[in-house]
Image: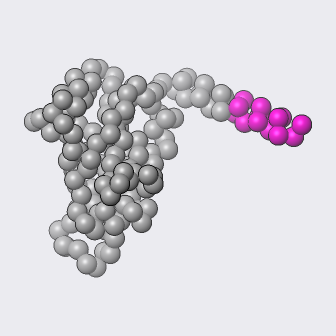
Amino acid sequence: MATYIDNRKAHFNYTIEDTFEAGIELSGFEVKGIKSGQGSITAAFCIVRGGEAFIIGMHIPPYQAHNIDPGYNPDRNRRLLLSKKEIKKLAEKDDIKGLTLIPISLYSKGRYIKVSVAVARGKKVFDKRETIKKRDVDREIRREYKIN
């Protein structure tokens, strides 16, 4: 299980409450682009509309820019492949004020590319400061134990 793209700011900007694993509908050259480590999900989010889930704002450049359709949009909306029960759960969570659906990472599972989707609540500025303080204290503790 190799992780291709990771949303490193997700844990800093959001408090993760629940995670789901979903398949994603991609073209062949998009799969090659992801496997080569290209792409970004930092500005992406998910929505549920009409009984389907979509990921919006995910940028996947083509693997070979000269060999694609001239009308290709690297920021197009991509459908998430979930069961109806999972889509219903996500729709219920998405309707709650203050919760959002964000992608955490893109990884392989067997021969398929999966996306980890999290139900998250945005952090306030003081929560982010606490996270920074905790990280610094942990770093100092690790340094102390490493030296002695």
Q: Position of residue 50 (x, y in %)?
A: 10, 36
Q: Can residue 104 be seen in this view?
A: yes
Return the residue nearer the eye: 17 or 58.
Answer: 17
Q: Is residue 59 visible?
A: no
Q: Where is residue 74 in the image (x, y as percent from the top left)?
A: 27, 61
Tell me where the magenta segment starts and ends, as one range. Answer: 136-148
- Depicted 82 relative to depicted 107: above or below: above
Quarter of the image with the C terminus is top right
Number of labelled discs? 0
Q: Position of residue 44 (x, y in %)?
A: 33, 45
Q: Which residue is drawn at 41% across and 41% down?
A: 104
Q: Which residue is drawn at 45% across and 38% down?
A: 10
Task: Tell whether 82 sits left or right of 63.
Answer: left
Q: Residue at x 37, y 27 (%)?
A: 18
* Residue 83: quadrant of the picture: top left
Task: Tell whether 122 sits left or right of 53.
Answer: right
Q: Residue at x 39, y 63 (%)?
A: 35
Task: Tell whether 105 sits left or right of 145.
Answer: left
